[in-house]
């Protein structure tokens, strides 16, 4: 019986068949390190089951995915206090005589305010003849109903026959519950020597504020 002779072509084809059959098994069971990339993965191939728990860090996520799910809208908070929203200023270009003697007073400026919190700032210059050094001129903010909000004092003095002047500032923050007329008054309870006193360059300013806290 004749033994078949091996040719070069038969040997080469047998080796190619072995490599083809055995190479596929090697590729599946022993992938070289770092050989799988984005191109080798099918779409949707990586699922939640394939990811180890707590293996994905926040830095691995896209910026748009880091915020997490948006929760329901919370309740509306209370409204904050209103800031300054209105200023009323009254200026007197004329002079106003200040009566002397007990019980006398001159209204030198007035303003009507709506309910709310207000900062009141009033000032005037009192011009007068000489008075006893112990005497005081008194200027005050008072409501139309007679409630005194704040007082300012200026001490008298001077030599007989002299004419003096002094600045009297008055300021207060107050909260009004109803519409109120506030008057700026000045008075002097005792006689003066020489020129009768009067108020000059008077200003009354009211600014609405969010709230007034007395400390």
Image (tube, helix red, strand yellow):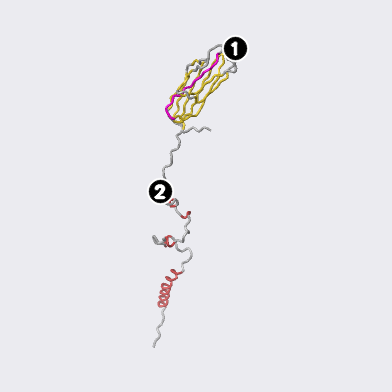
Residue position marked by numbered label 1 in the rendering: 160
Q: Please give the range of residues in magenta.
A: 177-191
Q: Is residue 4 left or right of residue 125?
A: left
Tell me the number on the disc at residue 21.
none
Foreground residue among 29 and 198 = 198
* Along the viewing direction, whichever of 78 and 46 lies nearer the viewer: 78
Task: State the image coordinates of residue 107 (x, y, percent, origin top left).
Answer: 47, 19
The spot of residue 214 in percent (x, y) is 52, 32
- Percent x, y for residue 100? 52, 15
Residue 72 numbered mark, or none: 2
Q: Residue at x 47, y 26 (%)?
A: 206
For this view, does 103 lie left or right of residue 11?
right
Task: Count every numbered label the image shows and give the total.
Answer: 2
Q: Is residue 187 magenta?
A: yes
Q: CA distance from mark 2 to mark 1?
A: 81 Å
Depth order, front residue of 51/130: 130
Asked if residue 38 is among those painted magenta in the image, a careful observer would answer no
Q: Position of residue 196 (x, y in %)?
A: 53, 13
Relative depth, front residue between 71 and 47 = 71
Vertical side of 97 occupied by 2: above or below: below
């Amino acid at each position: 019986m004749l033994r078949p002779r091996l040719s070069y072509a038969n040997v080469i084809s047998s080796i190619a068949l072995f490599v083809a059959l055995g190479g596929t098994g090697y590729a599946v069971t022993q992938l070289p390190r770092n050989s799988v990339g984005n191109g080798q993965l099918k779409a949707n191939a990586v699922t939640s089951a394939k990811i180890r728990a707590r293996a994905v860090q926040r830095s691995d996520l896209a910026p748009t995915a880091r915020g997490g799910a948006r929760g329901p809208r919370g309740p509306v908070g209370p409204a904050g206090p209103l800031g300054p929203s209105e200023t009323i200023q009254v200026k007197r270009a004329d002079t106003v005589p200040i009566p002397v003697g007990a019980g006398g007073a001159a209204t030198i400026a007035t303003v009507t305010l709506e309910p709310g919190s207000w900062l009141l700032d009033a000032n005037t210059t009192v011009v007068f003849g000489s008075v006893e050094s112990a005497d005081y001129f008194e200027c005050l903010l008072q409501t139309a109903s007679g409630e005194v909000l704040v007082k300012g004092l200026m001490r008298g003095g001077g030599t007989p026959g002299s004419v003096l002047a002094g600045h009297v500032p008055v300021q207060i923050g107050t909260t009004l519950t109803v519409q109120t007329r506030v008057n700026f008054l000045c008075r002097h309870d005792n006689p003066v020597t020489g020129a009768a006193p009067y108020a000059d360059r008077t200003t009354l300013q009211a600014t609405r504020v969010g709230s007034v806290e007395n400390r």
